[in-house]
Amino acid sequence: MNENYYPWGGDFTVCSPGGCVAVVLLIIDHIPPEDVAIYGPLKTENIGVEKIVANVISNPYIRYLAVCGEDIRGHRAGSSLVALHKNGIDKQHRIIDAPGAIPYIENIDEKAIERFRKQVEVVNLIGVTDKKKIDSIIKEYTSKHPLPFGEPYVAIKIKPEIDSKMDDKRALHSKIVVDYMGKIEKRSI
Amino acid sequence: MFSFTKNQEVFDISGVHIGGQPGIYPTVLFGGLFFKGEPNFDDAKNELKKMMTLSEKTGNPAIPDFFIKKEEDIEDIINFIEKTLPKNYPFSVDITDPSIKVKILECLHEKKMLSRTIYNSIHVGITDEEKLTLEKYTPDAAIIVAFNPKDKSPDGKIEVLENGAHLTDKGLLDIAKEIGIKKILIDTAALAPGENSGASIAAIPVIKEEYGLPAGCAIHNVVEKSKWLDNFGVARKIVDAASNITINIFGGDYAIFGPIANSDIVFPIMAWNDILISEYTENYFGVSPVDSHPRRKFRP
C-alpha cells in the first residue's frame, strides 16, 4: 500500500492496493471480496463521513464507493454520505438535503469535498443486506478497471487555533483557575 | 476534587436532585435500555429492578434512559415506562431520529408524563419542527449536548452553547431557554477514541464554573467504540464502567453510563468515588453531603 494512503486513519481494513472500489458498511456485518481497495463501517453523519472523504481521495485508484446495509436510524450516516456526494455542503457546512441528525462537515475543506464528488461514483446499496447480491454488484464494478483519478489528494484536517504559551500556568483550561486545594474560579481577563 | 466559585444550580427532577457543589449530592446515574436489537420488556423489567436496588443500596439516584429507535416502538416503550416505573419517577428518552421526536413528545403529553421526562437531547441538529413541538409539549428537563463538529475542545463546546458556532442561529442555551426548558443539564459530548474525548471531561469543571449548570457526559461511549480493548478480554466491561469515575472526580453531576446491565459495577464504583469526594470537600470546603449520599451509608 502507498504509505500516503488513508492518512486520517479510522476503523477500516485495507485490501487490494489498486482496487477501484471502497465499501462502506452500515448496519451489516460483512467482508467484501478481497479485490476491493478498502472497506469499513460508517457510524456517524459528521466525523465518520469526513474520514471516508479524506481517506478515499488519498487513493486515486478508488473510483467507486459502494454504500451497503441498513442505514443507521437517527444518524442516517449512509444517506448523509450519499447526499454529500450528490449535493455538497451549504454555507453553514451542512450537507445539503442530508437526513441525518447533525450532518455537518467541519474538518475538511470544500476543495477536498469537490475532489471526492468528482473522483468517485457512489453505488447506492443502502437497504440492501443480501450479501451475495452486494458482492455480485461490487464485482461488476471491480471488473471495470477505470484509470486512477490523478494524484493522491491529502486533505488537511482543519484544526481550531489553539492559544497556548509555554508560560501558561493554567490547570485544565484557560477559562478557569484552580488553586492548590481545588477551588475553581473563573480566570479574570 | 473541586469547589466552584460560581453559584451551582440544583434541580429537583421529580424527586431526584442533580447539580450543586461537588460532595453534596450523589452522582446521578443514567442507565440505558433498548439500545441494541428489539426491545425486550421482560429483560428490561429485571434490569430496572436490579438498578433500583443498587440505587437504594448506594444512594446514587438511578434514572432509566430509554432509547427509542423507531416509530413502531414508541407506544410500547412509553406504556412500559408508565406501567413499570414507580409513580412520578423520572426517566429520560434518548432519541436520535429527528422524524420521531415529535411523536414521542405528543405521546408523553397525552399520557401526562412530561413532568417527569428528561429530554435527551437538544443539539446543533435541532429542527424548527422540534423547537415548536418542544414549546408546545415542554418536558421537565432537557440535556443539551455540547457537540461542536469543528472544535471538540472545551472552547468549542462553550461556543455551541453560547452562539451555536454558526450551526444554529443562536446558542443552544438560548434556544433551550426560549423553548421554556427550565432545568437544563449540559452533556459535554464524549466522542470516539482519538476524537479528543478527554476534552469532554476537562469541559465539565469549565462549564460548571461558566454557567453553574449541572454537567456530565456519556464517557463510556468512548470505551464502547474502542477496538483496541478487544485485546484485553473481560477487561472491557470493567474499563467501560470505571471510565465513569472521571466524571465525578472532575466535578460532574451525572453519568450516562451506558447499558443498564453494567449497573452492578457502575453503582458501587461511583458511590465509592462520591464518598472520597465528599470526605475531601467536607474537610476542605465545608460542604456536607445530603442524607441520601453514599457517604451516609458507608460503614468502614
Image: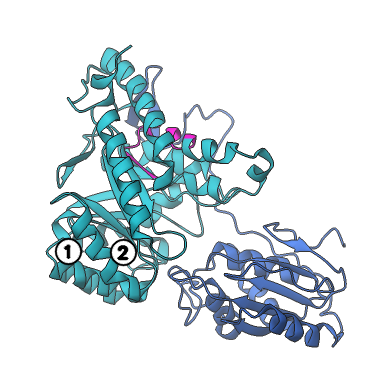
Chain colours: A blue, B cyan
Name the foreground residue: B110 vs B179: B110
Name the foreground residue: B113 vs B215: B113
How crowded pointer 1 is (Cα within 10 Å; few <14, some 14-19, many 20+) is rated as many
Q: Which residues are magenta?
A: B242-256
Rendered location of residue A106, percent (x, y): 54, 64
Residue B204, image quadrant: top left
Looking at the picture, does residue A179 appear above or below residue A150? above
Q: Residue at x 45, y 36 (%)?
A: A173
Q: Residue at x 39, y 47 (%)?
A: B260
Type of amino acid under label 2: Lys
Rendered location of residue B18, percent (x, y): 23, 40
Rendered location of residue B250, percent (x, y): 40, 32
> Which quarter of the image is occupied by the N terminus of chain A?
bottom right
Q: Earlier in the sequence, mark 2 or mark 1?
A: 1
Q: As drawn, is B286 to the left or to the right of A24?
A: left
Type of amino acid under label 1: Thr
Looking at the picture, does residue A183 appear above or below residue B10? above
Secondary structure of the residue carrying tag 1 is loop
Residue B282, image quadrant: top left
**Chain letter of the residue beneath label 1 in the structure image:** B
Name the foreground residue: B291 vs A149: B291
Name the foreground residue: B77 vs A18: B77
Q: Is residue B5 visible?
A: no
Rendered location of residue B289, percent (x, y): 22, 23
Q: What residue does disc 1 label?
A: B138
* For the residues bearing labels 2 and 1, Cβ distance under 8 angstroms: no
Magenta span contains residue B250: yes
The verdict on a common chain for dots 2 and 1 is: yes
Q: As drawn, is B2 to the left or to the right of B233?
A: left
Disc tally is 2
Q: What residue does disc 2 label?
A: B170
